Image: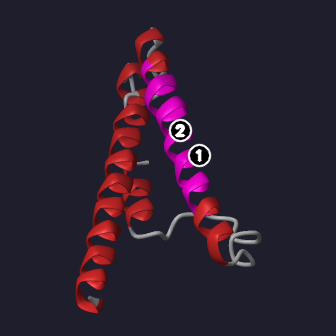
Amino acid sequence: MIGSAYCFYKDKHLALDLVKGRAKGAFNVVLSVFIEAAIVFFVGYVFVYGGWKLTANATNVSSVMRIPFKFLYSILPISGVFIILARALKYVQLFAERKEKKGENA
């Protein structure tokens, strides 16, 4: 799960590029922003919020490993925070690169 944050940062995660690959111009930009917002919302809601609720409500213990499920489930909100931080860092780098390109063209 934590490795998925690295995959999101490197853009090596599973993605469906059927529509995005065919989009051109302004529609491609709008579609990219929508996709990124959907990813952040999904990860925030399912991984962080849902994982937090799952971790808080877990009361049982693994029968084989004798580890409380709270420890096992806690990886969901932790990896969700890492994924959101990885995407935020990626956005900062993209904006910095665009700013440099604009500075070179001016």
Residue 24 lies in the magenta-colored region: no
The percent coordinates of residue 15 (x first, y second) are: 63, 64
- Which span of residues is magenta-colored? 32-52
Please say if 105 is above or below 63.
below
Look at 51% across and 24% down and name the residue there. Answer: 50
The percent coordinates of residue 54 (x first, y second) are: 49, 19
Alpha carbon separation for disc pair 1 and 2? 5 Å
Please say if 76 is above or below 91.
above
Q: Secondary structure at mark 1?
A: helix
Query: What amino acid type should be assigned to the residue bearing mark 1?
Result: Ala
Q: Nearer the viewer, residue 67 or 97?
A: 97
Q: Are marks 1 and 2 in contact (CB under 8 Å)?
A: yes
Q: Residues within 10 Å of mark 1 (few under 14, many from 20)?
A: few
The percent coordinates of residue 90 (x first, y second) are: 34, 63
Q: Residue furthest front?
A: 106
- Quadrant position of the C terminus in the picture: bottom left
Q: Which residue matches tag 1?
A: 38
Left/right placement of residue 93 relative to residue 3 reads left
Picture quadrant where residue 56 is located: top left
Residue 35 lies in the magenta-colored region: yes
Look at 49% across and 70% down and name the residue there. Answer: 12
Picture quadrant where residue 87 is located: bottom left
Q: Residue furthest bottom?
A: 105
Query: What amino acid type should be assigned to the residue bearing mark 2?
Result: Phe
Q: Nearer the viewer, residue 101 or 53?
A: 101
Look at 30% across and 81% down and name the residue there. Answer: 102
The percent coordinates of residue 10 (x first, y second) are: 40, 70
Look at 38% across and 35% down and name the residue there. Answer: 75
Q: Which residue matches tag 2?
A: 41
Please say if 101 is above or below 32.
below
Magenta portion: prevailing SS class: helix
Left/right placement of residue 78 relative to residue 53 reads left
